[in-house]
Image (cartoon, rainbow, N blue to C red):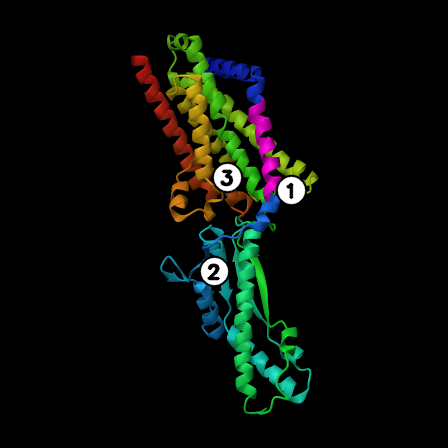
Amino acid sequence: MLNKLLATVKKEALLLLRDKVGLAVLFVMPVALILVMTLIQDSAFKSINEKGIPIVFVNDDNDSLGYNIKQGLMENDLCYLVDSIDGKPATAELAKKAVSEGNFLLGIVIPKGATAAIRKNVSALVDETMNGSDSLQQQQDSVEITILIDPVAKKSFLNAVTSNLREFISEVKTKIMFQSFSEQIADVIPDRQNAPTNSYQKSQIIHYKEIFASAASEKIIPNAVQHNVPAWTIFAMFFIAIPLSNSILKEKTEGSVFRLHTMPTPYLLLINGKIIVYVIVCLLQFLLMLAVGKFLLPQLGLPALVLGNSVAGIFLLTLATGFAATGFGVAVGTLATTDHQAAIMGSLSILLLSALGGIWVPSYVMPQVMRTISSYSPLNWSLEGFYKLFLRGGTVNGILPDVCKLMAFFFAMMAIAHIANLKKRNV
C-alpha cells in the first residue's frame, strides 16, 4: 500500500515539474500580486472613509463629558455605537477583549472622574485669572481617554475615525469648560474687561492613549503588508485548483484513469498522491510569500511582515488551508468533464470565494448581509486565522476553530469528489 502511494506521489511530482507554465502561475503570479497590490494599497489605505464603524463605548465617567460624547457619537453617521456586550454593560476589560476578537473596530473608554477633573482644572484657570498666578501647571489633573483599536483595521481607516472622535471630544471638552468657566466667574467678574482669556487652550487637559487590542508580545502596527501577504497567499493557494483539476482531466482524456481503475487500489489512495504533492506545493508557496513579505518588501520601502507569536499556529493554519485548496481542486477536476469547464469553474469560483472572503475588499466594510455571507467562505476562514496570528497575537487555540472549518471543507470536497467518481464509473 505504501509503495503504491509513493508511486502516485512520484507520478504527480513529475507531471507537475514538467509543466513549466503551471509552476510559473503557482509561484510567480502570487509574488506579482503581493508586490502590485501592496504597493497600490499602501497609499490607498490613506484615503478610506466609510460609515457605520462598529464602536464599543465604555462610560466610566457617568457625568457630563461621558454623556455628551456618547450622545454625539450616536448621532454621528460615521459610527455604529454600542455600550453593551452580550447583554452586559461594557467595561474596559470586556471592550478590549471584544475588540481583540474582531467584534468591534474601535473601543472608547471614558475614565472615572473625567468631568470632575475638567471642572477642577477650570477652577484652577479661574484662580489664575483672578490672582494672576501660574498655579495651573502644578494643579492640573489630566484626563486620559483610552482608544482601543483592532489591529485588523487599516491605518488610514482608523485615522479617519479617530480624527472625527478627537474633533468631537475636543468640542465637548471646550463646551464643558466654557460652561463651568462662565458659571464660576459670572458673579465674580461682572464686567468684560477682566473676562477670561483663551489661555486654557495652551493646557492639554485631555490626553489620548491609543492601544492596539492585541495579545502579541511585540507591537504590531497594521499596514498593507500585514493585510496583503496572507490575503494573496491564500488566493494563490486556492488557485492551485486549476492545475490540479487539469491534471485530473488530463488523466481522463488520455485514458490513464481507466487503467488506474483496473488496478486493485482504492480511488482515495490514487488521489492521495495528488493531495500530498499539491499540499507540499501550497506550503512552498506560503514559504515564498513569507520570504517576500519579510525580506523583499522592505527593500521597496515597505514595512517588513511581522509573523506574531505562534510558529506552530502558522504551520497548522497553512497546512489546513493547503488541504482545503487541494480538496477544492480535486472536487472541481472530478465534477468537470472538459478542460474548459475546469478552467472556467475553477477560476470563477475562486474569484467569487475570494471576493466574498475579504481578499479583494475587507469584510468589515461590507454591508451586513455580505458580512454574513463572507463568513461561509473558506478563504475568509483562513484569512481570519492569519489575522489572529499576524495582527492580534493569537495562538494555536485561537485559530483552532478556523482550522477545523477548513479541514471540514476539505473532507466535504473529498466526499463530493468520491460520490461523483462513483457515479461516473457506474455509468
Q: Is residue 291 left or right of residue 240?
A: right
Of the two numbered discs 2 and 1 on the same chain, state the one appearing first in sequence. 2
How far, Cα to Cα, is label 1 from label 3? 21 Å
Residue type for callout 1:
Ala
Determine the residue positioned at 47% across, 13% down: 3
On the image, numbered disc 3 is attached to which residue? 360
Magenta residues (range): 24-41
Crowd around label 2: few <14 · some 14–19 · many ≥20 (10 Å): few
Residue at the farthest front position: 192
Of the two numbered discs 1 and 3 on the same chain, state the one appearing first in sequence. 1
Residue type for callout 2:
Glu
How far, Cα to Cα, is label 2 from label 1? 31 Å
Q: Is residue 358 above or below residue 120?
A: above
Q: Is residue 391 left or right of residue 135?
A: left
The answer to which of 293 and 385 lies nearer the viewer is: 293
On the image, numbered disc 2 is attached to which residue? 93
Residue type for callout 3:
Trp
Mark 1 and mark 3 residues within 8 Å of each other at the beta carbon: no
User: Does dot 3 land on a helix, a strand or a loop?
Assistant: loop
Of the two numbered discs 3 and 2 on the same chain, state the one appearing first in sequence. 2
Q: Is residue 155 visible?
A: no
Residue at the farthest left position: 427
Crowd around label 1: few <14 · some 14–19 · many ≥20 (10 Å): some
Coordinates of residue 285 in the picture (x, y in percent): 56, 29
Q: Is residue 179 above or below residue 353?
A: below
Mark 2 and mark 1 residues within 8 Å of each other at the beta carbon: no
Quarter of the rendering occupied by the C terminus: top left
How far, Cα to Cα, is label 3 from label 2? 33 Å
Coordinates of residue 284 in the picture (x, y in percent): 57, 28
Disc nearest the viewer among 1 and 3: 3
Determine if the magenta segment contains residue 247: no
